[in-house]
Image (tube, rainbow, N blue to C red):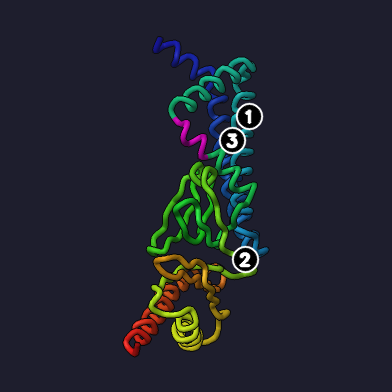
Amino acid sequence: MYEGVVEYLRLNYMKFAWSIATVLLVCTVYRLLVGFIKKKGQELELEPHIRNIVRLLLRVFAIVIATTTVFNIFELPTNVFLGSSALIGAALGFGSSQTINNIVAGFYVLLSQPFKVKDYVKIGDLEGQVEEISINYTSLYTPTFNLLKVPNTQVMNSKILNLTHEGYIKYTFKVNFGHELTEEQVMDEIIKPAIEEFHDSCVNGEFRCPEAYMDVVDRLGKTYMIRLFIPKGEARTLYTMQPALTRLIMRRYDDVRAVK
């Protein structure tokens, strides 16, 4: 058996050499094209998800070209190609079903575009700024200042709320008050003054002024919605500004209660 293998290699060494050279050439061209796409994408200011789609398609094309060329060099029949594909498909099906599902979901996310890079989104119970959309994962920059990689299968199977519109992250949060204060007192003595102080001191009037409205009234108290307008892509600013406004509101609330 060993002698047969040696003899086969001796007779087909040129085919192996051409195959290796072909694979190396395809890899080299692929890397050069990826670099070119990255450079041109930055020059043309293309969205990152568009560059990801082009890079993915180029990768698939490179694999097809390399595989087809190697099969032609060795003059392998079609049934060998089909048999190998079936074997690989079965192995992938049994051993990497989650990966395949992620790839399919990645195509869906990239093509359907429920959000784009730098959008602020809520995906199910998760939220954050989209930093990258790859074929397997969507990366979120979360309110804990960490980078979270969400499998694209989870993205595809979750409700998606995109909070980015017209160049702003329109982020809304709730503030609750009891019935010891009237609606006029809450708005005129607590929320509005806190918003004005926040807009003048914290953001120096550079951002759009926050908005507030009463959302729900029940036997336990009143719920108000506060909406912040933070420029798109500045999630870090949002994560510091929202607690700052909340503190101002609570400080005003404590002052009003102390006087009362």
Residue 181 lies, with reference to residue 234, above or below; the image says below
Label 1–label 2 contact, CB within 8 A: no
Image disc number at residue 165: 2
For the residue pair 117 and 55, the one nearer the viewer reads as: 117
> Alpha-carbon distance for marks 1 and 3?
10 Å
Marks 1 and 2: which is nearer the front? 2
Q: Secondary structure at mark 3?
A: helix
Q: Is residue 184 left or right of residue 168?
A: left
Mark 1 surroundings: few (<14), some (14-19) or many (≥20) residues within 10 A: some
The quadrant in which the N terminus is found is: top left
* Residue 130 visible, this angle: yes
- What's under tag 3, amino acid-wise? Ile
Q: Position of residue 175 (x, y in %)?
A: 43, 71
Q: Secondary structure at mark 1?
A: helix
* Residue 203 visible, this angle: no
Which quadrant would residue 164 be assigned to in this image?
bottom right
Q: Position of residue 180 (x, y in %)?
A: 38, 78
Q: Is residue 190 magenta?
A: no
For the residue pair 255 and 245, the one nearer the viewer reads as: 255
- What's under tag 1, amino acid-wise? Thr
The region drawn magenta spans 96-102
Of label 1 and label 2, which has the lower sequence position?
Answer: 1
Q: Which residue is mark 1?
A: 69
Q: Which residue is mark 3?
A: 63
